[in-house]
Image (cartoon, grey):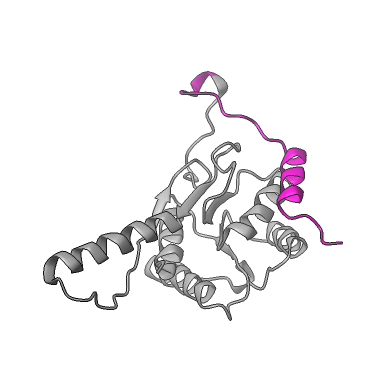
Amino acid sequence: MSDDYGFGWRAAEHLIRHGHRRIALISDTPSLATTRLRQDGFRAAMTAGNLPIDERHMQTNCEERGEVLRAINYLLHLDQPPTALISTNTRLSLGVVPALHQYRRTDVGLISIGDFDMAASLSPGVTVIDHSPEALGEEASTTLLRQLSQSGAAPQETLITVPAQLIPRGSGRSLWAPCKSRTQRRGPRRKYVDHHTALRWSARAHPTAG
């Protein structure tokens, strides 16, 4: 199983270490066990960092793309808007990214729980918590082979938890880190994706039912 509590904790802890103090959470309904655990992990990391949780920053029940856009609009217009966001699943991230581009607020930090296509190609690249099915399958196979080699008996039922893997790509950057100029950048040049392109990409990923 995925370490959902750890996903929420790891995302918040990364942003806190990079200087963020006002962090918002974009999630779907907490009635889902995975979502609830990710929210719990987020709250625990904020508490451990001695940071208050502004309940206005807890945008839950965002299940449609339009709800994500309204949540982003609300957060950005608060008297003390968050400096960073955590999206609790890939589907929500596909709404958060174009919304930030639409408002030209890619300076707001972002961590997506769940990787997605083009996450590394955006500018800035989206920092993610990876919890791939492949990692779960590999860990399950390793555990099964270990049990068989040790006893030769029928394998016992085992609860397998795969820890969170954070992949930093830039969107979870430090508040104190200045933006690099073109002449200061190193490595291959990133493909720039403007907010119109991001919106079209999101629309393709979530076609309207009709």
| Quadrant in which the C terminus appears | bottom right
* Residue found at x 45% / y 51%: 19
x and y, in percent, of residue 208 in the image: 81, 58
Residue 112 in picture, x, y percent from top left: 54, 55
Picture coordinates of residue 158, whole percent (x, y): 29, 75
Q: Which residue is drawn at 69% across and 55% down?
A: 95
For residue 86, side relative to residue 47 (left or right): right
Residue 93 visible, this angle: yes
If the image is split into quadrants, where does the N terminus sit? bottom left
Tell whether 25 sits left or right of 129.
Answer: right
Residue 16 or residue 166, whichever sits in front: 166
Left or right of 73? Residue 33 is left
Task: Find the residue positioned furthest to the left.
Answer: 150
> At x 68% / y 61%, what residue is drawn?
75
**Furthest residue in direction top, as rendered:** 183
**Above-or-below relation of 97 to 118:** below
- Examine the structure image and report whether residue 77 is included in the region drawn in magenta: no
- Can you tell which quarter of the image residue 87 is in? bottom right
Residue 11 is situated, as x and y percent measured from the top left of the image, at 45, 58
Asked if residue 187 is among those painted magenta in the image, a careful observer would answer yes
Residues 159 and 122: in front is 159
Which segment is the magenta one? 183-210
Q: Give the tally of numbered discs.
A: 0
Does residue 157 appear left or right of residue 68 in this picture? left
Considering only vertical position in the picture, is 53 above or below 112? below
